[in-house]
Image: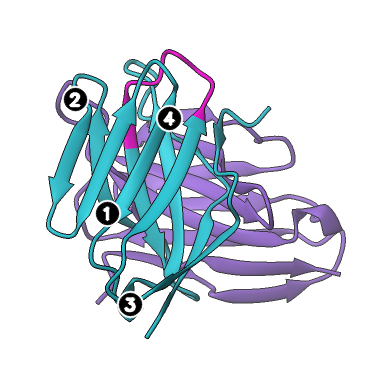
Chain colours: A purple, B cyan
């Protein structure tokens, strides 16, 4: 079983619809992240959470919201989807302990297409 | 503005030879750097890291070099194997940034048997 699971893996929807992408992890990590990947732009951070009560905006949070329902669950919502939100979305986790930054562990991604 | 850049979108190398992937950054506060490897339909997987107190870190066939004055890092794979064919991302973060990483755009490596 995957340590970081994203659902759904693929989604096609229409402009204006509300979409929720879900992420769950069994790694026991405190920190969770949502990224999007666009061709030629690499991965960009949307939101991150250090624990259930701590949510932070990333580089490109406009048009998105998140919910940290439990230590193991972090969901990303598009309240009213628009075509330029078509992208590959990744959830990631990392440990929260220690003085140094830690590598992040990624799920396999959700490919979202908005028509 | 792209703070981490990978200027070569693709690279082809013969099996057994050395692969060198390059990455440049602009933010002098970055002090921790990672390389990730990504296969199609999978998420990136962590490969190797280096902190700014070092200029080299080795793990088996993989070595990362850091040149702080040039704000440049490189990943060397020796010898290259067909299974190394993947997209490689470099990423950088600054201490105190809350583990926020900035990613490059990736280099697609093809190792030819």
Q: Which residue is mark 4?
A: B72
Look at the image and say whether residue A85 sits in the magenta stretch.
no
Q: Chain of mark 2?
A: B
Q: In the rendered image of this protein, does residue B89 appear above or below residue A62?
A: below
| Residue B43 % position (x, y) | 42, 64
Find the magenta span and give its range. B25-33
As measured in the structure, the alpha-carbon distance from the residue carrying label 3 to the one carrying label 4 is: 26 Å
Label 1: state its secondary structure. strand
Q: In the rendered image of this protein, does residue B18 appear above or below residue A68?
A: below
| Residue B53 % position (x, y) | 19, 19
Q: Is residue B48 left or right of residue B109?
A: left
Of callouts 4 and 2, the N-terminal one: 2
Q: On the same chain: label 4 and label 1? A: yes
| Residue B50 % position (x, y) | 24, 34
Callout 3: few (<14), some (14-19), or many (20+) C-alpha neighbours within 10 Å?
A: some
The tag on residue A15 is none
Q: On the same chain: label 3 and label 4? A: yes
Quadrant for the N terminus of chain B in the image: top right
Of callouts 3 and 4, the N-terminal one: 3
Q: Which residue is mark 2?
A: B54
Q: On the same chain: label 4 and label 2? A: yes
Name the residue located 44 percent from the left edge and 57 percent from the top edge.
Answer: B88
Q: Nearer the viewer, residue A46 or B78?
A: B78
Quadrant for the C terminus of chain B in the image: bottom left
The tag on residue B15 is 3
Q: Which residue is mark 1?
A: B47
């Amino acid at each position: 079983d995957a340590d970081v699971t994203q659902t759904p893996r693929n989604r096609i929807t229409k402009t204006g619809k509300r979409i929720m992408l879900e992420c769950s992890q069994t790694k026991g990590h405190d920190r969770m992240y949502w990224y999007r990947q666009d061709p030629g732009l690499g991965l960009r951070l949307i939101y991150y959470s250090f624990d259930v009560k701590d949510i932070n905006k990333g580089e490109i949070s406009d048009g998105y919201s998140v919910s940290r329902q439990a230590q193991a669950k972090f969901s990303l919502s598009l309240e009213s989807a628009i075509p330029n939100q078509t992208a590959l979305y990744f959830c990631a986790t990392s440990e929260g302990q220690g003085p140094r930054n830690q590598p992040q562990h990624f799920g396999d991604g959700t490919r979202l297409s908005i028509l | 503005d792209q703070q981490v850049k990978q200027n070569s979108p693709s690279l082809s190398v013969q099996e057994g030879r050395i692969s060198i992937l390059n990455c440049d950054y602009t933010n002098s506060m970055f002090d921790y750097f990672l390389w990730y490897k990504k296969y199609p339909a999978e998420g990136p997987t962590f490969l190797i890291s280096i902190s700014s107190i070092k200029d080299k870190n080795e793990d088996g066939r993989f070595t990362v070099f850091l040149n702080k004055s040039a704000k440049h890092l490189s990943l060397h794979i020796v010898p290259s194997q067909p299974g190394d064919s993947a997209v490689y991302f470099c990423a950088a973060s600054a201490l105190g940034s809350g583990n926020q990483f900035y990613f490059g755009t990736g280099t697609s490596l093809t190792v030819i048997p």
